[in-house]
């Protein structure tokens, strides 16, 4: 099949890029269900890597697109943004990479040159503006379906057996690390862990409340403990998630945030939690209000969960000012993935960061909708697609 002409495609005097085939899960519309289709995928160009996926986490963010909570700019749209794999093709003039290299994909690329990367805020890299369009900065695409350009979730589309990514989204890892486990560090681990360590700035001896113990909140629990919190209060209505939270660092767990807030006040002389991290699956305005009421003077609420585009957050203005409380958003846990993912892998290797225990069930690509049904049923901490 001839390559489809598109913006940024090579001209008549340049080397042609002949696409190969890959199976992948795409959305044709939103709301919608994931459909498994055969996609055309270009050969890698300069600064690009062709990757054979080993595993992809079933993160709630992709489900937000399927449910219409978050709007993407391009259909068809190939999903997945938490993955790991092996390089099988390297674009011309792409130093530092070879076929056979193992990597984790960061769902936020890091150009290393923009204001945000230069100031150590790689999670805010200007390249993030194309994440929900799924194109390269020049407007070109790398996947197609029956001649139509296909958007790549975060430029990586880990719900594909093979994917083509820019090196700015790649973090090389050691070959002996299990890709089916460490794929989680491409999104969920850094987002949760960083929400506690970076965004909430947890300190030794503090009391921290984590609201929502899913694939993000469970790592906020671990991050709070790593930072030295004396009390880590896990809040989730699902008993299984509360039990897992206690296994990886929560000192107490509650089904209701009101109970957790009362407990926090009871052990802090009536002051409240030092920080509250909101990591609920679908953010509701009331979640933030409840967390805001649970923290002490000069405490911090970190909002990590994602709501629909119409969700508006309201807090009491006098309490905000007179109690000097702080409301802090967190994208990727304010991490710089090219720096922090290797750190997390070192912690995993040493046993300080637990990942294997948090993968409840694995699926094939064809079972992706079953995996998300299990997520909604509350039976998974994290589901992972494993590729043959």
Image (spheres, rainbow, N blue to C red):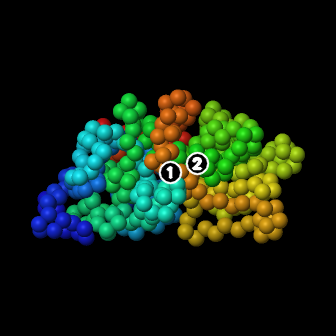
* Residue at x 18% of width, y 65% of height: 10
* Residue at x 29% of width, y 63% of height: 141
Task: Label 2, secondary structure: give it.
Answer: helix
Return the x and y of residue 295 as percentages of the image width and height: 77, 53
* Residue at x 32% of width, y 69% of height: 139
Which residue matches tag 1?
A: 336
| Residue farthest along the right direction in this orientation | 269
Q: In the image, is residue 385 above or below residue 25?
A: above
- Look at the image and tell me in which quarter the C terminus lies: top left
Category of crowding for the residue at label 2, using alpha-carbon neighbours closer than 10 angstroms: few (below 14), some (14–19), many (at least 20): many
Q: Which mark is residue 58?
A: none
- Look at the image and tell me in which quarter the N terminus lies: bottom left
Say whether residue 295 is left or right of residue 336: right
Q: Total marks drawn?
A: 2
Residue 360 visible, this orientation: no
Return the x and y of residue 273 as percentages of the image width and height: 77, 49
Return the x and y of residue 42 as percentages of the image width and height: 22, 56
Residue 48 visible, this orientation: yes
Say whether residue 115 is left or right of residue 282: left
Residue 229 falls in image quadrant: top right
Gap between marks 1 and 2 measured at Cα: 10 Å
Q: Nearer the viewer, residue 114 or 45?
A: 114
Which residue matches tag 2?
A: 194
Q: Nearer the viewer, residue 11 or 265?
A: 11
Task: Label 1, secondary structure: give it.
Answer: loop
Category of crowding for the residue at label 1, using alpha-carbon neighbours closer than 10 angstroms: few (below 14), some (14–19), many (at least 20): many
């Amino acid at each position: 099949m001839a390559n489809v002409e598109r913006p940024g495609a090579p001209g008549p005097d340049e080397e042609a890029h002949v696409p190969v085939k890959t199976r992948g899960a795409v959305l044709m519309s939103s709301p919608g269900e994931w459909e498994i289709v055969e996609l055309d995928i270009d050969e890698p160009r300069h600064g690009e890597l062709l990757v054979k996926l080993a595993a992809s986490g079933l993160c709630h963010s992709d489900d937000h697109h399927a449910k219409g909570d978050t709007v993407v700019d391009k259909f068809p749209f190939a999903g997945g943004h938490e993955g790991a794999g092996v390089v099988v093709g390297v674009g011309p003039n792409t130093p530092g990479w070879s076929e056979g290299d193992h990597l984790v994909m960061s769902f936020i690329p890091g150009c290393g040159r923009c204001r945000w990367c230069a100031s150590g805020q790689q999670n805010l890299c200007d390249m993030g503006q194309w994440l929900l369009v799924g194109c390269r900065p020049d407007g070109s695409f790398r996947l197609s379906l029956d001649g139509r350009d296909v958007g790549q979730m975060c430029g990586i589309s880990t719900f594909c057996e093979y994917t083509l990514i820019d090196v700015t989204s790649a973090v090389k890892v050691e070959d002996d690390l299990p890709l089916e486990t460490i794929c989680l560090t491409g999104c969920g681990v850094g987002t949760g862990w960083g929400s506690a360590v970076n965004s909430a700035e947890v300190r030794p001896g503090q009391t921290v409340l984590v609201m929502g113990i899913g694939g993000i909140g469970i790592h906020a629990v671990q991050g709070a403990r790593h930072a030295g919190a004396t009390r880590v209060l896990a809040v989730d209505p699902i008993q299984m998630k509360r039990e897992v939270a206690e296994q990886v660092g929560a000192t107490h767990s509650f089904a209701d945030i009101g109970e957790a807030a009362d407990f926090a006040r009871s052990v802090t002389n009536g002051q409240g939690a030092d920080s509250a991290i909101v990591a609920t699956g679908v953010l509701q305005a009331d979640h933030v209000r409840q967390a805001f009421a649970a923290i002490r003077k000069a405490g911090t609420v970190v909002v990590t969960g994602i709501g629909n585009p119409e969700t508006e957050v309201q807090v009491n203005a006098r309490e905000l000012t007179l109690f000097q409380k702080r409301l802090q958003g967190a994208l990727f846990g304010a991490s710089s993935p090219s720096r922090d993912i290797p750190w997390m892998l070192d912690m995993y290797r040493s046993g300080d960061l637990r990942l294997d225990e948090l993968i409840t069930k694995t699926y094939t690509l064809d079972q992706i909708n079953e995996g998300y049904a299990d997520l909604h049923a509350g039976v998974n901490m994290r589901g992972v697609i494993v590729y043959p």
